[in-house]
Image (tube, rainbow, N blue to C red):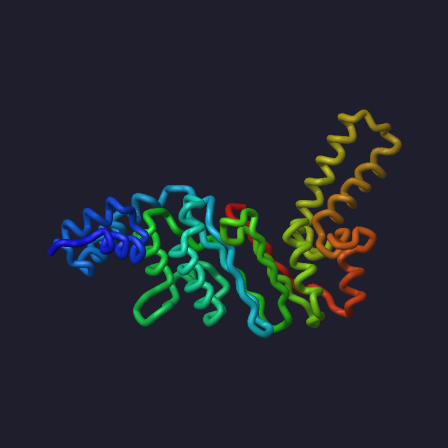
Amino acid sequence: MAYTAADVKKLREATAAGMLDCKKALDEAEGDFQKAVEIIRVKGLKGVTKREGRTTSNGLVIAKVEGDLGVMLELNCETDFVAKGDRFQVVGNELLAHLLKSKISEVDAFLASEITAGRTVQALVDEANATLGEKIEVRRISVLDGAPVGIYLHRTSPDLPPQVGVLVQLTKAVAEVGKDIAQHIAAFEPKYLNREQVPADVIENERRLAEETAREEGKPEAAMSKIIEGRVAGFVKDVSLIEQSFAKDAKKTVKQILDEAGTAVTAFQRFRVGQ
């Protein structure tokens, strides 16, 4: 059975395989389109294990909020060429829809869950791995439920899908505040909600570094303690969301903005592809 250039194009669109691979599959299938699709899938799946050790530093962050439920997912691939492709983004949307429905917050449990009857999320990811010819993986997921959630997705390049995503949970929904705080988190990368959440070992390590730095700078011994504690306090302020200077008004802290709006942040998540 003969095939045309239109058949090759159709097969490429259906499988995201390369032109040469599509031609070879159609040759092997003697022009039978469905058989060619199966050939590409089988050959692609055989290569899945060979790609296991590859690095996935590209991809997308995708998120959605419905009512008091916010979900976010990072899907990784090897190249930005695949990341900007429609097929990869369709997979991301399928996974996000399942995450929104299932509310599963652990990656392993999410991968093992059934996205359709008899088909797990991992099977869907493996199929994407096969058809796209790259290692595809769900790196992390987030589920915030039970209270209003603000959302922000940021594109680092206009031709790529969002690379940074933020979910922020509030005690009370206030117009625009959730998005403003989410944008702030995207830009300023706080590690903790407040100073109470900063682990003691992190503070002690910062104190050690502050002392070593102060001594290398030749600071007087009499002032050493004050200098060290001042630097540690500055560090804690920098990594604590509510103590940071607000992105849109540096004269106020994030806490002041929240207080004025009559709300507070109870949790947040920030994903950046590859970080």
Q: Is residue 248 above or below residue 58?
A: below
Residue 32, x across and y down, in percent: 16, 58
Q: Nearer the viewer, residue 156 or 186?
A: 156
User: Is 19 placed above or below 119 here?
Assistant: above
Question: On the image, which quarter does residue 115 sit in?
Answer: bottom left
Q: Residue at x 39, y 51 (%)?
A: 136
Residue positioned most to the front: 5
| Of residues 272 and 229, the one drawn nearer to the viewer in this rendering | 272
85 left or right of 151 in image:
left
Residue at image point 71% right, 54% down? 241
What residue appears at the point 71 percent right and 42 percent down from the top-left corner? 204
The picture places residue 198, in percent across and down from the top left corner, at 69, 51
Quarter holding the N terminus? bottom left
Q: Residue at x 76, y 57 (%)?
A: 254
- Judge left or right: residue 106 versus residue 165: left
Q: Nearer the viewer, residue 192 or 263?
A: 263
Residue 85, horizontal then vertical, whole percent = 41, 52
Where residue 21 appears, as percent x and y from the top left, is 24, 46
Taking the view exactly as shown, the residue that stands out farthest to the right is 222
Q: How many marks?
A: 0
